Image (cartoon, helix red, strand yellow):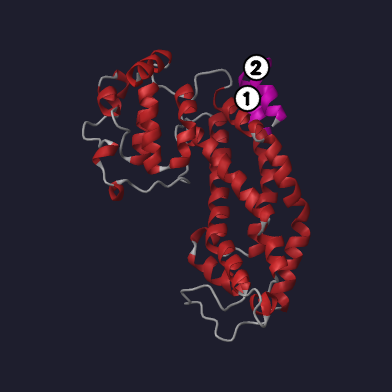
C-alpha cells in the first residue's frame, strides 16, 4: 500500500524523491529550511540546486550524486568525489555561514545586485539581533530572575528592575527577532542561489512576494516596537548613568552574574565580533533603522526594474505595494 502511495505521488510530482531527500538533508544541517524545499524546486532546476547545495555544504542529499552525474548541465562543476550526506558523520558536516555575502562581479546586473543587497542586509541584521538576544538579553533576563525577591532586588544590583528588563528586552523585542528569523528562512531561496530566476518578475518578484506575505506581521510587530523606542532608550541611558559600578567587576569573568547590566554588556560586546564597539541602545534601535533602508533599496529596485521591463509587468505593482 505504501509503495503504491509513493508511486502515485511520484507521478504527480516527478521530483518528489529528490524533495524528500533534500528535506532529510536539511533536517541534519539546517532543520528550519526544510519548509522551503518546494519553493526551491519551483524556482530553480535540479542542476542549479545541486551546485548551490554543494557550494554551501560541501555535500549533497542522498541519491543526488548519481542523478547529477547524468545531467549535462553539471559538467562544469560536478566532481565524482562529492560526498553523499549519509557518508558523513555529524562532526564532518561543515559549519554553514548563513551570512556569507555574494561578491558581485562587474558584469552582474544592477537589478540582481540590489536584490542581493536587500537579502544580505537582512541576514546581517539577523546576525546582530540573534547574537544580541542569545549572548546578552538571555543573560540579563536570567540575572533579573535570579535576583527576584533578594534583599537588594534587581534594581539595586543589576541596575534595572524586573519591569524595566521586561519593558526593554521582553515581548516586543522577542517578537521582532522571531519575525527576522522567519524572514531569513523565506529569503534563503534567494540567498542560497544567486542565479536569475526564469519566471515573470524574476528575482525582484520573488523578493517582493516574500515581503508582501509578511506585511501584516511587519505592521503588528514593528509598530508597537517603534512606538516605544524613544522611551525605551531613555530608560537604558538613565539606568547607565544612575547605576554604580560593581565592587568586584572583572572583564575576564566567565559567568555573567553579580554585575550590572552595563558591565554585562561590556563583556559580551567585547567578545562578540558583530557587537564590538556598539552600545545597547544602538542595537535596540536597529529594527527602527531598517525601514529607511528598506524604502531606499526598494525605490532603487523599482526604478531599475521599470527601466528594464514592460510597465505592464505585474512585478511593478508588487514592488510598489512593498
Q: Which mark is residue 128?
A: none
Front-lying residue, 99 or 217 = 217
Return the x and y of residue 211 as percentages of the image width and height: 63, 34
Residue 162, quarter of picture: bottom right
Q: Is residue 103 visible?
A: no
Residue, disc 1: 305
193 or 42, nearer to the observer: 42
Horizontal placement of 87 versus 203: left or right?
left
Task: Specify few, some or many for label 2: CA neighbours under 10 Å numbering under 14, 14-19, or 20 or more.
Answer: few
Main SS of the magenta segment? helix
> Residue 96, how many percent across, how many down?
40, 46
Residue that protrudes farthest toward the bottom in the picture: 247
Circle 1 SS class: helix
CB-based contact (under 8 Å), mark 1 and mark 2: yes
Magenta residues, start to end: 299-321
Element under label 2?
Answer: loop
Q: Nearer the viewer, mark 1 or mark 2?
A: 2
Q: Position of residue 315 (x, y in %)?
A: 64, 22
Amino acid at each position: 500500500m505504501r509503495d503504491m502511495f509513493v508511486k502515485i505521488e511520484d507521478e504527480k510530482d516527478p521530483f518528489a524523491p529528490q524533495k524528500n531527500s533534500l528535506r532529510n538533508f536539511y533536517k541534519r544541517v539546517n532543520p528550519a529550511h526544510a519548509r522551503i524545499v518546494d519553493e526551491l524546486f519551483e524556482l530553480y532546476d535540479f542542476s542549479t540546486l545541486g551546485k548551490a547545495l554543494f557550494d554551501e555544504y560541501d555535500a549533497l542529499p542522498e541519491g543526488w550524486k548519481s542523478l547529477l552525474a547524468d545531467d549535462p548541465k553539471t559538467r562544469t562543476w560536478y566532481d565524482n568525489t562529492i560526498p553523499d550526506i549519509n557518508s558523513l558523520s555529524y562532526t564532518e558536516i561543515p559549519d554553514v555561514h548563513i551570512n556569507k555575502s555574494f561578491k558581485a562581479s562587474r558584469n552582474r546586473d544592477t537589478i540582481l545586485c540590489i536584490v542581493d543587497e536587500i537579502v544580505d542586509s537582512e541576514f546581517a541584521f539577523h546576525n546582530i539581533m540573534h547574537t544580541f538576544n542569545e549572548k546578552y538579553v538571555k543573560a540579563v533576563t536570567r540575572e533579573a530572575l535570579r535576583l527576584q525577591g533578594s534583599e537588594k532586588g534587581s534594581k539595586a544590583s543589576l541596575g534595572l528592575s524586573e519591569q524595566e528588563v521586561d519593558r526593554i528586552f521582553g515581548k516586543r523585542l522577542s517578537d521582532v527577532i522571531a519575525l527576522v528569523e522567519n524572514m531569513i528562512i523565506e529569503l534563503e531561496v534567494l540567498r542560497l542561489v544567486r542565479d536569475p530566476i526564469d519566471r515573470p518578475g524574476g528575482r525582484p518578484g520573488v523578493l517582493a512576494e516574500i515581503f508582501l506575505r509578511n506585511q501584516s506581521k511587519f505592521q503588528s510587530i514593528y509598530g508597537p516596537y517603534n512606538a516605544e523606542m524613544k522611551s525605551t532608550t531613555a530608560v537604558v541611558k538613565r539606568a547607565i548613568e544612575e547605576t554604580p559600578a560593581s565592587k568586584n567587576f572583572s572583564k575576564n569573568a566567565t559567568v555573567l552574574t553579580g554585575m550590572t547590566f552595563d558591565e554585562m554588556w561590556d563583556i559580551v560586546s567585547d567578545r562578540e565580533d558583530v557587537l564590538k564597539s556598539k552600545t545597547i541602545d544602538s542595537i535596540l534601535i536597529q529594527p527602527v533603522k531598517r525601514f529607511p533602508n528598506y524604502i531606499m533599496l526598494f525605490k532603487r529596485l523599482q526604478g531599475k526594474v521599470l527601466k528594464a521591463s514592460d510597465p505592464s509587468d505585474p512585478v511593478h505593482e508588487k514592488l510598489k505595494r512593498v
